[in-house]
Image: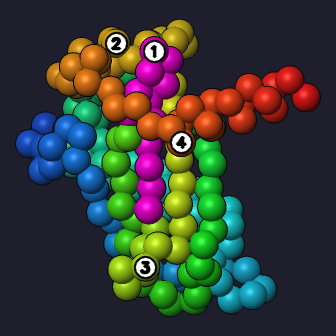
């Protein structure tokens, strides 16, 4: 991840290559250090490729520059992943990453892990804004990156996820 941070800092003033709410595509290949004894990608390694994909998204859509200038950061608050098909050793894959929506507290991301056009994994990530150790709410984040806070799209899956999260707290 250090390489992603350094690359992002170096490239922070480059123009955005996708729309602020566009989809970023990152390609990769399953390497020997990423596999488990079944010879497919270890579940924990998915988190690394998703993290890398979000860093690339932030560079490509221009958000990193704004975050860097305002000393704003997004941190993972929750993650839900579904493994649909295995990624075998040396498989070439793509991770399609986009910002789905936001609410008062969180920004929601979607990752689609694809091999040859087939969905192999799907993840939803909920991230919270932090600045100087305190919560940065999404209205401020939207203002910082130049999107309209009111333009958030409602998704049933996010509502269900919030209900599941609340149910876990009630256990």
Which label's residue is closer to the chain start, 3 or 1?
1
Q: Residue shown at 45%/55% (left/top)?
A: 111
User: Where residue 11 sits in the image (x, y, percent)?
Assistant: 19, 45
The label on residue 118 is 3
Asked if residue 27 is among those painted magenta in the image, a careful observer would answer no
The reply to whether residue 104 is in sight is yes
Mark 4 or mark 1: whose residue is earlier in sequence: 1
Crowd class of label 1 (few under 14; some 14 to 19; many from 20; radius 10 Å):
few
Secondary structure mostly seen in magenta is strand
Q: Is there a contact, CB below 8 Å, between mark 1 and mark 2? A: yes
In the image, the segment drawn in magenta is: 101-112
Q: Nearer the viewer, mark 4 or mark 3?
A: 4
Q: Residue furthest left?
A: 15
Q: Nearer the viewer, residue 139 or 92?
A: 139
Q: Residue beneath label 4, please? A: 157
Calculate the distance from the C-alpha at mark 4 to the C-alpha at mark 1: 17 Å
- Tell me which corner region of the image, top left, top right, bottom left or bottom right, holds residue 136: top left
């Amino acid at each position: 991840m250090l390489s992603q941070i350094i690359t992002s800092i170096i490239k922070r003033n480059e123009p955005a290559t996708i729309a602020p709410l566009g989809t970023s595509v990152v390609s990769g290949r399953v390497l020997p250090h990423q596999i488990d004894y079944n010879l497919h990608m270890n579940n924990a390694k998915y988190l690394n490729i998703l993290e890398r994909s979000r860093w690339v998204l932030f560079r490509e859509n221009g958000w990193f520059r704004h975050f860097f200038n305002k000393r704003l950061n997004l941190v993972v608050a929750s993650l839900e992943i579904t493994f649909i098909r295995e990624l075998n050793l040396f498989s070439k894959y793509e991770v399609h990453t986009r910002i789905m929506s936001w609410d008062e507290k969180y920004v929601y991301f979607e990752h689609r892990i694809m091999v040859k056009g087939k969905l192999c994994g799907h993840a939803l990530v909920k991230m919270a804004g932090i600045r100087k150790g305190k919560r940065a709410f999404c209205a401020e984040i939207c203002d910082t990156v130049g999107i309209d806070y009111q333009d958030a799209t409602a998704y049933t899956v996010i509502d269900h996820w919030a209900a599941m999260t609340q149910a876990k707290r009630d256990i």
